[in-house]
Amino acid sequence: LGISTYAKRLQGKIDLRTTWHKSGAALEKTIDATRALCLDPRGDALDSEAFAALLFDELDAGGSRLSLCVGPAEGFTEGLRRRARLVSLSRMTFTHQMARVLVAEQVYRASEIRRGSGYHK
């Protein structure tokens, strides 16, 4: 399953889009860091329920806009790390493509947790 599968499942609930940036500096110029969850191994380790609560708290607080950022090869800039909320996907290292799919699945899972479906067991 890929990102497009989860984006399709989320239609009507969450608009899931992906954008590539060439560097951490380019990313930082494009997003509002106060409205971002940046995936970083030094971030908070959350289970799926806690991630769902955080995701929807942030969406509710920010007018339904939130950036979920997978770090560039050189890592996030220190400025972005200081201003954004850091969340750890895992202590392991993943390719950017794999991390994007894992995040998309967790966003979908969060929507199902909130809905109370049987998807998350």
Image (cartoon, rainbow, N blue to C red):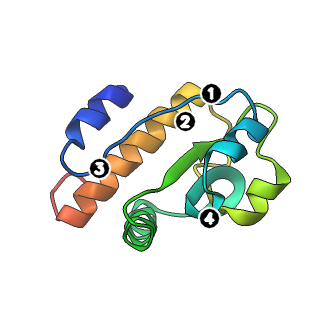
User: 118 and 43: which one is in front?
Assistant: 43
Quarter occupied by the C terminus: bottom left
Residue 62 horizontal side relative to residue 7, left or right:
right
Q: Residue furthest left?
A: 117
Which element type, helix, strand or loop, lies under badge 3? loop
User: Residue at (53%, 29%) from the top-left corner?
Assistant: 98
Of circles 2 and 3, which is in front?
3
Which element type, helix, strand or loop, lies under badge 4? helix
Mark closest to the chain's N terminus, 2 or 3 = 3
Which element type, helix, strand or loop, lies under badge 1? loop
Residue 61 horizontal side relative to residue 42, left or right:
left
Of circles 4 and 1, which is in front?
4
Residue marked by disc 4: 34
Q: Quadrant of residue 21?
A: top right
Residue marked by disc 2: 99
Q: Would residue 121 be visible to someone looking at this image?
A: no
Q: Given the image, on which type of amino acid does mark 1 rest?
A: Thr
Residue marked by disc 3: 14
CB atoms of marks 2 and 1 within 8 Å: yes
Q: Residues within 10 Å of mark 1 (few under 14, many from 20)?
A: few
Q: CA distance from mark 4 to mark 2?
A: 22 Å
Q: Given the image, on which type of amino acid does mark 3 rest?
A: Ile
Q: Residues within 10 Å of mark 4 (few under 14, many from 20)?
A: some
Q: Which mark is residue 95?
A: 1
CB atoms of marks 2 and 3 within 8 Å: no
Q: CA distance from mark 4 to mark 3?
A: 19 Å
Q: CA distance from mark 4 to mark 1?
A: 25 Å
Instruction: Note whether 119 is above or below 23 in the view shown.
Output: below
